[in-house]
Image (cartoon, rainbow, N blue to C red):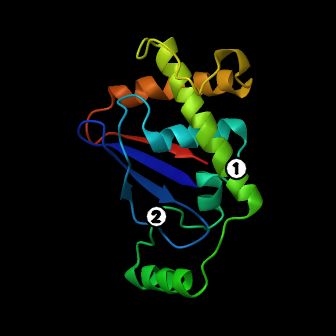
Amino acid sequence: MRVVFTKGPGTGYWIAVHRETGAALAPRNGPGGHSYLPHDLVHFLVEAEAGIKRGVYGRLAAGDNGLFWPADPAERNKAARRRKSKPTQPTPQARADMARSEALAASAVAVWEVRHGHAKTLPAYVSGDELPPVIDRIMARFDDYAQRWHALPVGGSLELDW
């Protein structure tokens, strides 16, 4: 699966997912909010580095639409009818993987911001003494991609393979 992050004005961005399994997905706007580490890029890097299989990107690669919608209106209508008639609940493993992704993402961004002078202290929910070892590997990924993202002009993209 190939994921394309395209920089928008300010801290906005668009994300497109090109995958082998499941309906073709329409690009969508990302939530923005960070000029170095866009939220969806953070989750991609965290899930890839931590080996999270059923987080946002693992589920997309397996054919789940996640927060995206099919690009084809007929597929979109079919998906909406399926959701309405037979809502699916994530498995316990998927819920655990999503919770781990969220927790690691929040902690890793906070640590990265302190290490790079964008914040003075860690928030109360992050204990610097008890960070899992994977945080250092995530930091290395953040260091690489944060600078590349920040340097992009509006309309420039980063492409990552899942």
Crowding at mark 2 (Cα within 10 Å: few <14, some 14-19, many 20+): some
- Counting residues from the N terminus, which is met first, the one under dot 2 or under dot 1? 2
Residue 140 in which image quadrant: top right
Q: Amino acid at mark 2?
A: Phe
Most foreground residue, 132 or 79: 132
Q: Of the numbered discs in the image, which one, if any, rests on residue 68?
A: 2
Instruction: Examine the rendered structure and indicate whether residue 156 appears above or below residue 125.
Output: below
Q: Position of residue 108 (x, y in %)?
A: 58, 28
Cα distance between the residues tagged 2 and 1: 19 Å
Secondary structure state at the residue bearing disc 2: loop
Indicate the position of residue 94 as horizontal and vertical percent values. 70, 57
According to the picture, the residue beneath numbered tag 1 turns out to be 97
The image shows residue 47 at horizontal and vertical percentages of: 64, 42
Q: Residue at x 54, y 80 (%)?
A: 83
Helix, strand or loop at label 1? It is: helix
Q: Is residue 119 left or right of residue 84?
A: left
Horizontal placement of 111 versus 150: left or right?
right
- Residue at 67% x, 65% y: name it: 90
Q: Residue 110: which disc?
A: none
**Residue 78, above or below 152:** below
Residue 64 spot, x, y in % from top left: 60, 67
- Above/below status of 3 relative to 21: above
